[in-house]
Amino acid sequence: MYKSEDLLEGDSFSGQMDGKVLQTCEKSFVQVQDILDQNRLLINEINQNHESKIPDNLSRNVGLIRELNNNIRRVVDLYAHLSGSFINKSIDVSSEGDSTGRPIHKRSRPL
């Protein structure tokens, strides 16, 4: 599992990030990992049901695939929230300026 400290190491504004953002990152990464672990189990069950070719198992796959789909949406939402947190924090940090009070200008990278 990834730790937020590992992901931020060497980042130009990691030293300026406050504990609240770091906690948000950690919480989000733990939630994502939990969902991905659950997805692994769902995929295994879906595959077993498919290989069994038993009608009831194949019917059950419909619900399992819906659950998997919803989990993927949740992961996307969590990453979108994380991305927004980083962007907002980056804007906050760059608008604060450097130690001389001059603003820090950062180049944006295209997505």
Image (spheres, grey):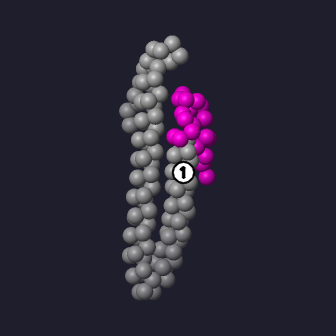
Q: Which residue is drawn at 42% across and 24% down?
A: 95
Please identify the quadrant where the C terminus is shown.
top left
* Residue 77 coordinates in the image, percent (x, y): 40, 52
Q: Nearer the viewer, residue 103 or 45?
A: 103
In this rendering, does residue 1 appear at all? yes
Residue carrying label 1: 27
Instruction: Name above or below for residue 49 compared with residue 91.
Output: below
Note whether 95 is above or below 53 in the view shown.
Answer: above
Residue situated in front as seen by the camera: 66 or 47: 66
Is 53 in the magenta?
no
Q: Find numbered disc 1 in the image and state the secondary structure of the residue it sits on.
A: helix
Residue at horizontal 61%, vertical 46%?
Answer: 3
Question: Is 6 contained in the magenta span?
Answer: yes
Stretch in magenta:
1-21
* Residue 5 screen position, x and y as percent: 61, 40
Circle 1 crowding by C-alpha within 10 Å: few under 14, some 14–19, many from 20? some
The residue located at (44%, 62%) in the rendering is: 71
- Relative to 58, is 1 on the left or the right? right
Type of the residue with mark 1 = Lys
Q: Which of the two residues, 87 or 23, is positioned nearer the viewer here?
A: 23
| Residue drawn 41% across the image and 53% down it | 76
Q: Residue furthest bottom?
A: 55
Q: Is residue 11 visible?
A: no
Q: Which of 72 and 45 is in front in this view?
A: 72
